[in-house]
Image (cartoon, grey):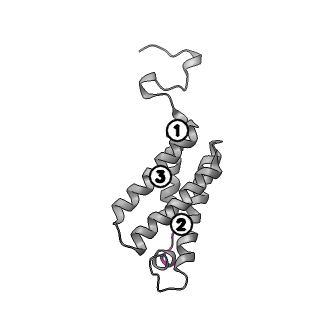
Amino acid sequence: GRAASAGQMGQLPHRLGGNVEALTAILLLIGAHYVADFAMQNDYVAAAKADTTRPDWFHALTAHSAHHAVAAGIALAVLGLPWLSGCLVVGVTHWFIDYGKAVRGWYGYHIDQGLHLGIAIGVGLSVATA
């Protein structure tokens, strides 16, 4: 193949769209989601957020969603992207998505994860292309 010129180094070919920033944001947001959903969530929070008979269910769900908001905000800030709007969207939507699964039982695990990943993709595209 042809050698890339100095001006082309680090750029994706045109056929891929060249939006490395959006792809990087999406990948970091997905990674942040998995860290917050699995590594940062303990058994206490997982049980409490799903049981509305417990007096702490609301706080457990809110704390879990706040972990997601902070993780997303850090991921976006590292890239120099608008982190506040991204972390608010991730945190609020995470609360409602988990409420729908854990409290209401409207859908199962795979739909829950798909919705969260869809939010990560949407937020990544939105903040990177704004």
- Residue 124 point in image, percent of width and height: 52, 44
Where does the magenta region start and end?
39-44
Q: Find disc 2 in the rendering and name its residue.
A: 40
Residue shown at 35%/68% (left/top)?
A: 106
Question: Residue 91 occupies which quadrant of the picture?
Answer: bottom right
- Residue 40 point in image, percent of width and height: 53, 66
Lower sequence index among marks 1 and 2:
1
The Cα–Cα distance between marks 1 and 2, rounded to whole angstroms, is: 25 Å
Question: Residue 66 occupies which quadrant of the picture?
Answer: bottom right
Q: Amino acid at mark 1?
A: Ala
Q: Find disc 1 in the rendering and name its residue.
A: 22
Is residue 49 shown to the viewer in this render?
yes
Q: Is residue 25 magenta?
A: no
Q: Which of the image's four quarters has the C terminus?
A: top right
- Relative to the observer, which residue lies in front, 34 or 57? 57
Residue shown at 51%/69% (left/top)?
A: 41
